[in-house]
Image (tube, rainbow, N blue to C red):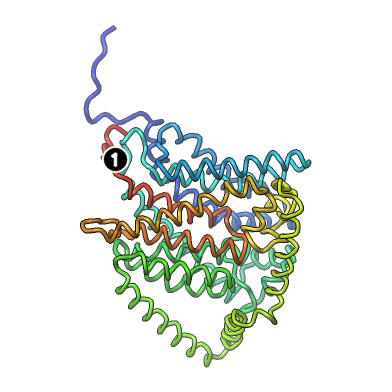
Amino acid sequence: MITYPKPENASPPLGTRFLFALKEHAATIALALWVFIPLVRRLVQLPTSYSTGNALTLVPPFFALGIFFLLRPKMKLIGFVQFAVVCTGFAFLYAFIVGIAMGSLVSSFYTFIDFLAPILIAAVVATPYRDRITSSVEERYFTYLKSVGVVTLIVAIYGIVQYVAPLPWDAKWMTDSQMQSIGQPEPFEVRVFSTLNSPGVLGAYLSLAMLHLIPLIRRAPILAYSTMLLGSITFLLSLLRAGWVAVIGGLFVYFIFSERRFALAKMLAISIAVLAIGTLVLQNTPGFEKPVEVLSQRFASLGDVDHDYSAIDRENQIQEGAENAHANPIGYGLGVFGTVTAINSYDGMNALIDNGFLARLIELGLVGFAGYLAPFIGAAALCFLHFLDSWKPGNTTLSKTDHLALAAGSITALMLLNIFGDFDRGVTSFVGWMAIFFFVSLSTPSTQAPVDKQRA
């Protein structure tokens, strides 16, 4: 049989082209699914009665797991990324087995994939591939940042519209879900949740997304600045104090770790001035007096925790949770104690322990919690060591891409969100670990694959 060589410009097989496209856009698709599926769910349920269980909630984590198992053989886990995946996998597999033994298979399984899926997909899309035919890690880094910018801009615009004139599907969901903490489905009465499923998840996501907009300024300034402006408004309207603390802490660390810290400090000062002027204008604009008053009271409560109901309730939760953790060092397992899973709840939030680290200690036990905590400590230590190295002559760690600053700011924000809330899952976890894993890849020698798209 005579075979003829393929011409050099021959198109690659359809399967190869599909895999290449999947590699390049998996992060964007995953981010969009986690952010917009809750809105799709509300639209689907508009003609029917409200239901706490919906298969749509499973789409983002299952997509993430599918991407991981599809691309895992074609990528190489490097250094800290492999360490983080192994530790997290061990921690939640252990708690999953304990949860099954305690007789809670369904909720344990969902909680298992809800925690594990974000870090797994982040590991494969933010690290180099073995075939070396995809775009470089740095190109994927900026493509991902643009995706965060576009998605966050949509979230911000929708959130503002939701606050001024709640749409029918959002109003119905607010009424049917009976969430007391999100206000009333009336203009200027909504505690904004935008396209997500609660103000808490929205605020946690935006606290990390706002950090991602800073390195985007050099590549897409119009997108970055417009999203910062509108995103800040929606972020404030979420009224999530844990998110406000997280973004302040993340920004502080970002400025310290960035080589552009003085320029960024100037930009932040201008932003604060504009926000202050805007607040004064709104305060004297008919119809906007109430939202300004609500925001002022919310900010004031940060310095008066002794008389704040939610702070007092959180303190009682933490005390009760600490007693439970001490009573059972083995752990209660996933989906058994302290967790209201997204299958059985409208927001997938922890309803008993408003402290992520303590909640994980209760679920995972001492052994599992050690595995869960190790990547947080490791990421913080890794950023700090690279920061120290950056002061050596000729070191370029503090590059203009700000990948070290973004990683350091993100791990700080994630840890603060876990101290003052329980948000280390789903889209929040995905965005946070993406920043950290991109930094690991960009700072590791010989990880920049040359692009040879013809072979793709």
Residue 261: give x, y in percent of width and height: 32, 70
338 or 70, which lies in front?
Answer: 338
Residue position for label 1: 449
Q: Residues within 10 Å of mark 1 (few under 14, many from 20)?
A: some
Q: Residue at x 53, y 51 (%)?
A: 33
Decide if residue 52 is on the left or right side of residue 263.
right
Which amino acid type corresponds to the residue marked 1 in the rendered image?
Ala
Image coordinates for residue 72, horizontal then vertical, percent:
46, 35
The answer, for residue 400, to whether it is visible in the render is no
Residue 206 lies, in percent from the top left, at 50, 65
Q: Position of residue 49 (x, y in %)?
A: 75, 57
Q: Residue at x 30, y 31 (%)?
A: 11
Q: Nearer the viewer, residue 274 or 101?
A: 101
Residue 438 visible in rendering? yes
Q: Quadrant of the C terminus?
A: top left
Residue placed farthest to the top in the image? 1
Q: In the image shown, does 344 or 100 lie closer to the viewer?
A: 100
Q: Residue furthest bottom?
A: 284
The vertical placement of 341 against 269, above or below, is above
User: Measured along the vertical axis of the image, is residue 64 above or below residue 277?
Assistant: above
* On-image quarter of the N terminus: top left
Quick one: which residue is furthest to the right in this view?
103
